[in-house]
């Protein structure tokens, strides 16, 4: 073969190569497609984006390859999944049409708007626009879905966070129409297909401000000394059928997002707050796990299937906590017995290797305009643990049940919720650090590591190092994800686990319901795209967490703006080469003390093994968990950033450091 022919053949091979990945667009406008397992990203020039935007999942064709074969150039041949279809920006209006210019630091084309798609928007209005059509080599076309009020800065900020993370803030009309067409009357034929448990005492326990009640508990005493306890979950999959417009929208979002002042729901309110919400004194369709349990919290029997329920009462967590503490109130005996069993489950779980990382939830008290006026800290109390333990039981039982079923002698693909064993590289520096406080770890097996963690978490209670060791311990852990490849859930100590109990707000639970129903009906259909769906749901979950963090940070800055120049007591919550973060004790707000602001005291360097910044001359240490006094010097809402300045406390610093400061001041 001639050299010329060889080159032709290579070009043909290269041009036929297709990869799937995520397009990242730089500020200069150049694109890179990040492909899993590829050593280098694929370069894509702006003219080859083919309607793709930053963050979109795309299929890219390789059109050129460097001599070393590693750097490839490609063109987008298909947008597989849009990260974002709604954008925040401004309108530019002319006589016959309008253009929308997005407020984004990543280049994107202006969106063309017909005058009948402006929804009342005027020239230079800030609006949210949805792309409705985009043909190759043409401008995208859109419609205005909301004109933003100039005075409502908070609403704009929250929506911007959601949009940047790929969550639409409005449901398309077609989705809302489909949800409105769903019947709200449960037919007699549907009830005949189900176990009727409407005559059994049933109640919900939820936060005081909840509207979507997706789980309920039923309770009755059986003749043979057993208790029958039902965990009833809203039957979302009855209403949201595969491949419908509703289903596609739910999958796209994959999760509800909980921001300080709002919920951005996975499903329209017609479903989440009406049809599927297990409201008191209404018949509702459920998917249930019903257990027969003895007084020792041993499961003697269980049943999985579809039910119709009738909730007798709606409890808040505060109601139930009051009953547990005071031992009086409505359904007192049932609540106390359920709590007793839940605490036994909890004890068994930790004995078998679950790790007891306790968490506190910080919430802002908001006024009627969404402005933060205070902070509350919510702890996990027995009322929360009661619900948590029965939900864990149902999730574990469903996963165990499905794991035993074979199809063509193979396990059924199923969306497990997995949590990997700790990474030794992350774990070893933490273990060395914990040793300094006298805590020792047995790292022979994953089980012994879990046991060591629990011993440390008990021993550390109430001690100065509690916060830092809990925080660092959590950071050593892998992130839980959805996958069809089951490896168990390390943190919970379960061999089989899934999410079954929150289908109103999580799409994986809807998938679990559908597959479980197929198994129970013995009509199994293998979903070849299940792993791809699991990956998508994990990605959307991470995006939701990013949104929640960003919104919380915004509220922190908004709240702290009132206190510029004030001093606060805080705890060092993180260290880096460029400074350290401090969380204020009373407000639970976090800001950065930059390295530059410390230069007048000493030249500080990061000592990673100590999680500390250490002064080269004085030896002064700023370590995670240290209490410090700081002054608030800047609160930037646009960047969602607080800046602190460390305030020298002469009683907490050595004489050398003080003398260094005095000398500098004299100069």
Image (cartoon, grey):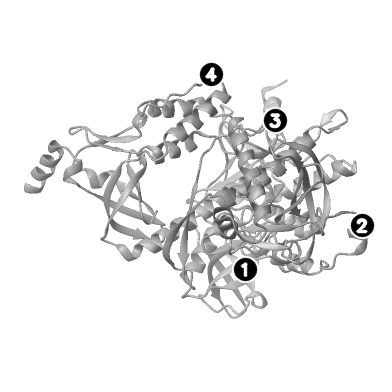
Q: According to the image, label 1 marks what residue?
A: 112
The answer to whether 340 is drawn above or below residue 72 in the figure is below
Rendered location of residue 5, percent (x, y): 71, 26
Q: Nearer the viewer, mark 3 or mark 4?
A: 4
Q: Residues within 10 Å of mark 3 (few under 14, many from 20)?
A: few
Checking the image for residue 339, the label placed there is: none
Give the structural element (helix, strand or loop) at label 3.
helix
Give the structural element (helix, strand or loop) at label 2.
helix
Give the structural element (helix, strand or loop) at label 4.
loop
Rendered location of residue 185, percent (x, y): 84, 68
**Comes first in the chain, label 2 or label 4:** 2
Q: According to the image, label 3 marks what residue?
A: 8
Question: Distance from label 2 to label 4 (Cα)?
Answer: 55 Å
Question: Distance from label 3 to label 4 (Cα)?
Answer: 57 Å
Q: According to the image, label 4 marks what residue?
A: 444
Give the structural element (helix, strand or loop) at label 1.
strand
Q: According to the image, label 2 marks what residue?
A: 192
The answer to whether 19 is drawn above or below residue 505 in the figure is above
**Quarter placement of the N terminus:** top right
Rendered location of residue 211, percent (x, y): 65, 64
The answer to whether 181 is drawn above or below residue 226 in the figure is below
């Amino acid at each position: 073969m001639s050299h010329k022919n060889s080159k032709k053949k290579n070009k043909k091979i290269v041009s036929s190569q297709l990869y799937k990945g995520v397009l990242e667009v730089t500020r200069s406008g150049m694109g890179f497609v990040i492909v899993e397992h590829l050593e280098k990203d694929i370069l894509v020039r702006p003219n080859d984006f083919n309607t793709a935007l930053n963050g979109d999942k795309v299929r890219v064709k390789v059109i050129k390859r460097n001599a070393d074969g590693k750097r490839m150039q490609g063109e987008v041949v298909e947008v597989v999944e849009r990260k974002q279809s709604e954008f925040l920006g401004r309108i530019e209006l002319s006589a016959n049409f309008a253009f929308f210019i997005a407020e984004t630091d990543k280049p994107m084309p202006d969106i063309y708007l017909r005058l009948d798609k402006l929804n009342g928007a005027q020239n230079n209005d800030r609006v949210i626009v949805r792309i409705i059509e985009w043909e190759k080599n043409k401008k995208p076309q859109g419609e205005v879905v909301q004109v933003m009020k100039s005075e409502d800065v908070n609403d704009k900020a929250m929506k911007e966070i959601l949009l940047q993370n790929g969550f639409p803030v409005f449901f398309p009309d077609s989705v809302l129409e489909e949800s409105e067409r769903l019947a709200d009357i449960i037919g007699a034929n549907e009830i005949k297909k189900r176990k009727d448990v409407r005559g059994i005492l049933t109640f919900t326990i939820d936060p005081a401000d909840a509207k979507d009640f997706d789980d309920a508990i039923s309770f009755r005493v059986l003749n043979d000394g057993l208790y029958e306890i039902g965990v009833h979950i809203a039957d979302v999959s009855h209403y949201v059928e595969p491949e419908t417009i509703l289903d596609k929208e739910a999958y796209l979002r994959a999760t509800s997002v909980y921001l300080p002042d709002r919920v951005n729901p996975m499903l329209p309110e017609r479903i989440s707050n009406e049809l599927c919400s297990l409201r008191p004194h209404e018949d509702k369709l459920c998917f249930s796990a019903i257990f027969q349990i003895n007084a020792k919290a041993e499961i003697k029997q269980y049943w999985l299937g579809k039910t119709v329920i009738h909730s007798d009462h709606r409890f808040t967590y505060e109601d139930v906590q009051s009953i547990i503490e005071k031992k009086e109130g409505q359904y007192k005996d049932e609540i106390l017995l359920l709590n007793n069993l839940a605490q036994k489950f909890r004890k068994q779980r930790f004995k078998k290797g679950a790790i007891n990382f306790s968490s506190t939830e910080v919430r802002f008290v908001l006024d009627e305009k969404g402005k933060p006026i205070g902070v509350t800290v919510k702890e996990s109390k027995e009322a929360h643990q009661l619900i948590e333990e029965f939900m864990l039981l149902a999730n574990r039982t469903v996963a165990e049940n499905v794991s035993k079923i074979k199809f063509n002698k193979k396990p059924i693909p199923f969306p497990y919720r997995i949590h990997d064993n700790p990474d030794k590289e992350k774990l070893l520096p933490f273990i060395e650090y914990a040793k300094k406080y006298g805590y020792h770890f047995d790292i022979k097996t994953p089980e012994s590591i879990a046991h060591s963690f629990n011993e440390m978490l008990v021993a550390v209670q109430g001690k100065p190092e509690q916060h830092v060791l809990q925080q660092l311990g959590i950071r050593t852990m892998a992130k839980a994800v959805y996958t069809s490849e089951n490896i168990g859930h390390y943190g919970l100590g379960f061999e089989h686990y899934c999410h079954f109990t929150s289908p109103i707000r999580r799409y994986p639970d809807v998938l679990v319901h559908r597959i479980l129903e197929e198994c129970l009906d013995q009509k199994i259909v293998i979903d070849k795209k299940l792993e791809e769906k699991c990956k998508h749901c994990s990605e959307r979950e991470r995006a939701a967490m990013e949104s929640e963090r960003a919104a919380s940070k915004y509220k922190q800055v908004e709240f702290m703006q009132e206190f510029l120049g004030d001093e606060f007591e805080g705890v060092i919550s993180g260290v880096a080469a460029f400074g350290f973060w401090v969380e204020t004790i009373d407000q639970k707000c976090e800001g950065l003390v930059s390295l530059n602001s410390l230069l007048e005291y000493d030249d500080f360097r990061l000592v990673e093994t100590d999680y500390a910044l250490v002064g080269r001359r004085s030896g002064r240490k700023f370590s995670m968990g240290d209490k410090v006094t700081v002054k608030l010097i800047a609160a930037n809402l646009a960047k969602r950033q607080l800046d602190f300045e460390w305030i020298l406390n002469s009683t907490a610093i050595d004489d050398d450091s003080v003398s260094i400061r005095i000398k500098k001041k004299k100069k």
